[in-house]
Image (cartoon, rainbow, N blue to C red):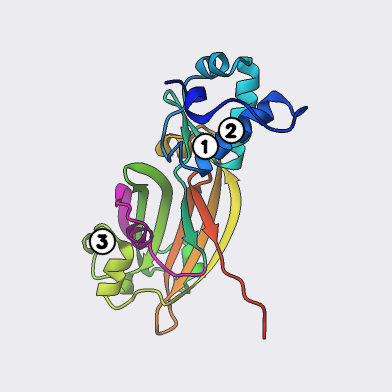
Amino acid sequence: MSLAEQIGPLRGQGRAPLYQKLQEVLRDAIESRLLKPQDALPPERDLATDFGISRITVRKALDGLVGEGLLTRRQGAGTFVADRVEKQFSKLTSFTEDMATRGRVARSRWLARSEGPVTPDESLTLGLSPGSRVYRFARIRYADEMPMALEYSTIPGFGLPSLDVVEASLYAALDAARNRPVRALQRLRAVLFDAEQAALLDIAPGAPGLFIERRGFAEDGRAIEMTHSWYRGDAYDFVAELNALA
């Protein structure tokens, strides 16, 4: 059965462009979960044939849905329904904890882990004296085998007993050392992934992402964490609850 037979013919405002009509039926199919997260769409030429429109029209429709974050393109694999994760920006949780609450399996691929003297930037952010020792951790974070983020963390030497205590979760290791952050300052901004970052996350160079700077503080008030993270814009949403002042 073709996709057109599954989700129905083009529809929409009578004089609306054909690409918008295709977007509407695809958007409805995604929202109703006729098309589920990580489902692959047929090739553009097949979509053009099935819906009786040109490949240029199909490409324009898909480009728009990619821009909305409903679809994602994977180099050499095709176009897929985006598998998005929501992150509560107001809650101080780890990536591993976020995935567990959503029934997802989190894992990491280590890029580097090292111990050394603090850099000037780390010293300023963490409030450490020159020459202080720090631990550095660089990882690709995965959810159900999908690469979701690049994460680079620096922890003061007093925060952990050694490099080796960090396994699946950095926060679990900090918790065990009684140095888990209890509050944090975060900044978020939109970025475009460069070629090296894109290759690590299996996305196209120039794809949109979210860059987050986090500085976490332990219960005694000392800075305990400096983390820079690059999240895929097509797979991650950040949500914050806002309340009016009384």
Q: In this picture, is 30 found above or below 178?
A: above
Q: Which mark is residue 29?
A: 1
Quadrant containing the C terminus is bottom right
Query: Where's residue 188, x and y in %?
Result: 58, 58
Residue nearer the viewer, 155 or 207: 207
Q: In this picture, is 150 found above or below 154?
A: above
Q: CA distance from mark 3 to mark 1?
A: 42 Å
What kind of residue is marked 2? Val
Q: Which residue is mark 2?
A: 25
Q: Secondary structure beneath disc 2? A: helix
Q: Is residue 245 left or right of residue 233?
A: right
Residue nearer the viewer, 68 or 165: 68
Q: Residues within 10 Å of mark 2 (few under 14, many from 20)?
A: some
Q: Which residue is mark 3?
A: 166
Q: Residue at x 51, y 32 (%)?
A: 204
Which badge, 2 or 3, is on the more N-terminal residue? 2
Q: Residue at x 43, y 48 (%)?
A: 149
Q: Residue at x 42, y 77 (%)?
A: 182
Q: Are marks 1 and 2 in contact (CB under 8 Å)?
A: yes
Query: Where's residue 154, x and y in %?
Result: 40, 62
What kind of residue is marked 1? Ala
Q: Nearer the viewer, mark 2 or mark 3?
A: 2
Which quadrant holds residue 83? top left
The verdict on residue 47 being magenta is: no
Which badge, 3 or 1, is on the more N-terminal residue? 1
Q: Is residue 206 visible?
A: no
Residue nearer the viewer, 2 or 85: 2
Q: Secondary structure beneath disc 1? A: helix
Q: Is residue 51 left or right of residue 137?
A: right
Q: Which mark is residue 103?
A: none
- The residue stretch that appears in magenta: 90-117
Q: Is residue 8 visible?
A: yes
